[in-house]
Image (spheres, rainbow, N blue to C red):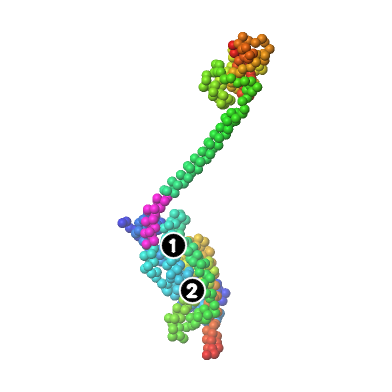
Amino acid sequence: MNCSELQTYLENGPLADRGAWVADAETAEHLAQCADCSRLVEVRERLATGLRLIRESVPQPSGALDAAVLDAYRRQTTRQSRPQRVSLGSSTVLRWTAAVAAVALIVGLVFFSGRKGRNTAVLAPMSQPPRIARPLEFTKSVPTEIPRSRRRRTATVPQQHSRPAAASASQGTSFPDGFSSLMYCDSLSCAGTMDVIRVQMPSSAFTLPPPPSAQNNGMVYADVLVGPDGIARGIRIVQ
Amino acid sequence: MDQLETRPDPELLRRALAGEEAAFLLLYQRLKGGIYRYAFYMTNSRTTAEEVTQEVFLSLITGARHYREERGEVAAFAFGIARNFVRRIVRRERPYQPLPGDDAVEKLSRALAPESQTAHGHLIRNELVEQVQAAIASLPDHYRQVVVLCDLCELSYTEAASRLGCPLGTVRSRLNRAHALLAQKLQPLRNNPAEIGPAGAEGCLI
């Protein structure tokens, strides 16, 4: 055996006491002749001895460690069996409550914002100035064929609700009985609800001779059909 | 009570989690020694080793949901926790650890002298232990791990590979390399006694 073989064996083999080396005659002979290899073996032998002594010198854990670990285990199991279940449940409920509240908040915002927009749409036409017969003298609205409740409703929300009878009558080119057309009227131009407003006007406004209902001062009463755009569609002399 | 002693570690862990104290105690007795010795060898402190052991078992109970039986043994899982704790402690206390210096070399050289030449054999043995521990502590971490596991905790290569999560060949090669480094650290001491002794005595002015 030469130095290289011995060093390879030392590097790849396990740490062992000197007895393991000396047991092999060939190795023992080489170690006796080679000081370097002998020193190398001695160092590794010392290392093996030191490791063995360290293994033997490890202190035992104290009894307090066992007590502390057992105490920690008991505390942990007690905590797991009691409050953690409650906290788990409460946290779940808390999460669901927060989610429901968030959804409700979003729905409420959407609902109220939509409602607010609708209210402005309703109020807008009401805030407009009186749109009919401004130069004329108002008397009072007289429902003709329109029921009273229906008429009031159409007056506030003219285009978004069902049309009254007058409106449906005006969709064609014909008007209700007695009304004369003041403008071209078809289903497009006369769409929407109409109001009937009674006005007092001078009889001279008519090209025809004054009707028998004309008063002494030359004034007559007339019912005017007014469209949603404020333009008069038809007129009827009140007899 | 059915025979808990024959039950495997994963079942003991499950039963311990369910509140069965006897199962926990048996699992503790099985794993305590290895974890404590590993922590002691890595830190050279009995107090720290006990602290690590206690923390490991507490973490084993609180963090048992992370354990997957198909990934390995409970012992390997607990060892992983212990290794993390030890690393944390070593990192925390590193600034306060003295570096091995010439004084340590001198002590080890005296320790390596033949016992027949000294009347303090027991003291020398203790010093030898201290110096080999210092040499191990000066190794890089991945070498120190295999030395502690294979040489001190006396785990097989297979068990050490399982604990460290690396191949068997890696464990063998690291261990050989670690032995070579340790021998290298101890080698200069062989020539020192003759030089250190007279020089120390002659150089002393008082």
Is A75 contained in the magenta span? yes
Give the side of residue A60 with respect to residue A238, left or right. left
Q: Note whether residue A4 is visible.
A: yes
Return the x and y of residue B185 as percentages of the image width and height.
Answer: 54, 75
Q: Which mark is residue A21?
A: none
Name the amino acid type tagged 1.
Val
Q: Which residues are magenta?
A: A71-88
Which is more N-terminal, label 2 or label 1? 1
Is residue B98 located in the magenta-colored stretch of the structure?
no
Picture quarter containing residue A114?
A: top right
Image coordinates for residue A77, horizontal then vertical, percent: 38, 56
Q: Which residue: 54% across, 24% down?
A: A153
In the image, residue B155 above or below residue B183: above
From what the image shows, is residue B206 above or below residue A150?
Answer: below
**Mark 1 burial class by Cα count in 10 Å: few <14, some 14-19, many 20+:** many
Let me know if marks 1 and 2 both belong to one chain. yes
Mark 1 falls within which chain? B
Crowding at label 2, few (<14), some or many (≥20) Cα neighbours within 10 Å?
Answer: some
Q: Extreme left residue here?
A: B1
Residue of label 1: B56
* Element type where label 2 sits in the image: helix
Residue beneath the point at 51% across and 38% down: A108
What residue is shown with label 2?
B133
